[in-house]
Amino acid sequence: MIDWNVTYAAIWRPRKQYLRPVLRIDPVHLDQLLGIETQKEALLANTERFLLGKPANHALLWGARGTGKSSLIKALFNSYRENGLRLIEVDKQDLVCLPEIVDDIRELEQRFIIYCDDLSFEAADNQYKSLKSVLEGSIELPPENVLIYATSNRRHLLPEFMRDNLDTRLVEGEVHYSDTVEEKTSLSDRFGMSLAFYSQSTQIYLDIIDSLFVDIPVNREILHQKALDFAYQRAAKNGRTAKQFYNGWAEQNINVTMR
């Protein structure tokens, strides 16, 4: 049994059916995340309301890959864990265990964020039904000390097909979606907060590069060109690519040629 007074985060391990305490927590901080100020402010405000016992929403962070969705949740947790915030990571395939996980924490004094990364479902996948019951409750009200923060590349979490719209109709100027569309959008609708993350500009990418190399004496013009070349090879200019470029620099010690 976890002592949540001294344990701040845990990961659900389905094979052994237990929560494993996290001893080495990712140290990312909010001031390291650039280009997502609007999303950062919205999620901070929601979390602060949650910690104060005020109404707050489950949050879905969706959009382009590598833009800081997961990092924002981890950084927010690092900022508030001394204020009673706790984090439990649950993989998508383990959502069937979510009701049991929540049962064990719903009466505790701490406030819990259930974190599910890269959340999406295939057409024949019905695991999302366990998530639905926790989001809005069944015959029992959902716990007041639990929120779900999920990330996804999809806005509606379930795949959408053109054929799903065949039964959609217009009645007196009002769109009535087909049952299939309603079913697929109903899950994402249960997240009261939906934050979109878009592909980042070249300038934001270079700002992130500069923040990573802030204490390293390098020629900025050469650094930027090498960072852009790396991004073009990866076909992505975002925070994840910037960190990968930095990690590669650490291995190759390329700053010798950048002075």
Image (tube, helix red, strand yellow):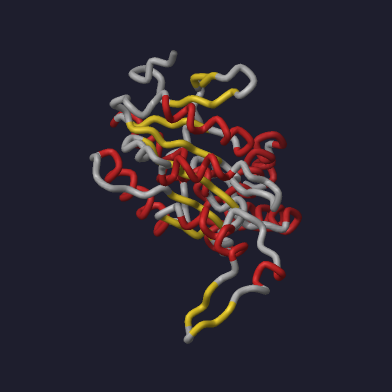
* Number of marks in picture: 0
In the picture, measured across the screen, residue 189 lies left or right of residue 164, that is left
Query: Residue shown at 40%/54% (left/top)?
Result: 192
Q: Is residue 242 above or below residue 112?
A: below
Q: Is residue 69 above or below residue 232?
A: above
Query: Residue shown at 41%/55% (left/top)?
Result: 193
Which residue is farthest bottom? 172
Residue 26 in picture, x, y percent from top left: 50, 31
Q: 148 and 201: which one is in front?
A: 148
Query: Residue shown at 60%/39% (left/top)?
Result: 92
Residue 135 in picture, x, y percent from top left: 44, 44
Residue 57 in picture, x, y percent from top left: 37, 49
Q: 43 and 68: which one is in front?
A: 43
Q: Look at the image and tell me in which quarter the N terminus lies.
A: top left
In the picture, measured across the screen, residue 28 lies left or right of residue 120, that is left
Which image quadrant is residue 167 in?
Answer: bottom right
Which residue is farthest top? 1
Q: 104 and 83: which one is in front?
A: 104
Which image quadrant is residue 154 in?
Answer: bottom right
Residue 65 in picture, x, y percent from top left: 62, 53
Q: Is residue 135 above or below residue 23?
A: below
